[in-house]
Image (spheres, helix red, strand yellow):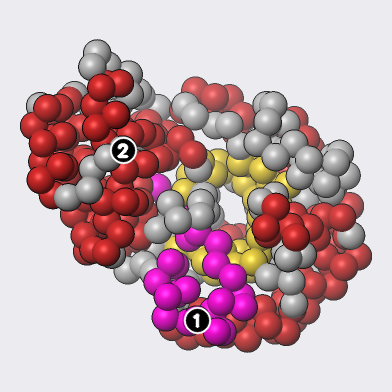
Amino acid sequence: MNFSWKNIKKPVFILGPMASISTQPLMKMCKKFGADIMFTPMISSNAVLYNEKETLKIAQFSSKEKPVIVQVFGYNAEIMNLAIKVIDKKLKPAGIDINLGCPAPKIVKSMCGSAFLKDYDKAFEFIKAIRENYSGQLSVKTRLGNKKFDILPFLQTLETIGINAITIHGRTVSDRYTGKADWPSIHKIANTLKIPVILNGDITDFKTAYQELKKSPIKGIMVSRIAIQKPWIFKELKTKKEFNPSKKELAKLMQEHLKYYLEYDKSKTFLEMRKFLASYLKGFDGARELRQQAVTVNSMADFNKLIKLLK
């Protein structure tokens, strides 16, 4: 069946886009635990056109991970439209998401991501040009504003041109990732717009998620950083119960994650796995020593030694 934001049922739980992290191996782990929708790491529209093979690999997925939304960033609508055609043809995602929220200095300096929140008129023309050229499901992920919560009128204009969904990270650009996410402002947006609104930022447990889901018509929750530490957050969200894997279960999950990475990219497997291994190994006696070993894993022998110590 074709994916449609309009037809999603509340609550929907989504893996957020994280650079070099929410690639196919993590998608597989999160799908295993019940994630409803996956967002790929953001990819550059320019890079899609000039380095297609390597760029599309970042957003690679299989039918088992669907529905998958490919997130794209860029500064030029014409280039963006050409890139989306390539993505749509080669990957066939459930939809495209435009990043208007990344606060990373190199992204902002290139006039992409959250740089658009400094000029809403420019941002509107950019999104409008994409909407006019792409007939699929088109969503936008953004923040509350540049320095203050002032994005609602802009989001209302996006609704009028047929944007299918909005994900809001509950901070301004100037906040970056400091302080607490401003969920009340996201609820205000959800109470105003008719299209699906997804809440993003600081949700790390099922109790908080369901408390926020009751406060407004938000359609669901997007989780990002917590999924690095425990992809089973989706199981907790679905069952409304905590899941605390035993050391034996944890070892099995780490082995499964490694298998997915070896299938995805053997050349970077152990380098990429280090951050996940260190994140998995928290909350029990001896975890600190194991994490110290995890960040130096560089071979299958190192990995097996770590697993043996965990068991």
Closer to us: 219 or 144: 144
On the rendered image, what quadrant is the C terminus found in?
A: top left
The residue sitting at 36% across, 67% down in the picture is 61
* SS for dot 2: loop
User: Does the residue at mark 2 contact the one at mark 1 (Cβ under 8 Å)?
Assistant: no
Say what amino acid the circle numbered 1 marks.
Answer: Asn
Q: Which residues are magenta?
A: 33-59
Is 42 a magenta residue? yes
Task: Quote the CA–CA distance across marks 2 and 1.
Answer: 30 Å
The residue carrying pointer 1 sits among few (fewer than 14), some (14 to 19) or many (20 or more) residues within 10 Å by Cα, namely few
- Residue 19 horizontal/vertical position (percent): 51, 55
In the rendered structure, find residue 51 and report the number of the disc placed on it.
1
In the rendered view, does 154 fall on the left or right side of 76?
right
The residue sitting at 73% across, 31% down in the picture is 182
Give the mark nearer the N terminus: 2 vs 1: 1
In the displayed image of the protein, which residue is found farthest to the top? 285
The residue carrying pointer 2 sits among few (fewer than 14), some (14 to 19) or many (20 or more) residues within 10 Å by Cα, namely some
The residue sitting at 51% across, 64% down in the picture is 69
The residue sitting at 17% across, 50% down in the picture is 299
* Residue holding disc 2: 295
- Residue 170 horizontal/vertical position (percent): 70, 38
Find residue 275 and report its image quarter: top left
Whether 229 is drawn above or below 160: the answer is above
Report if residue 30 is visible in the image: yes
Report if residue 31 is visible in the image: no
- Residue 252 horizontal/vertical position (percent): 15, 39
* SS for dot 1: loop
- Residue 55 horizontal/vertical position (percent): 47, 73
Closer to us: 5 or 232: 232
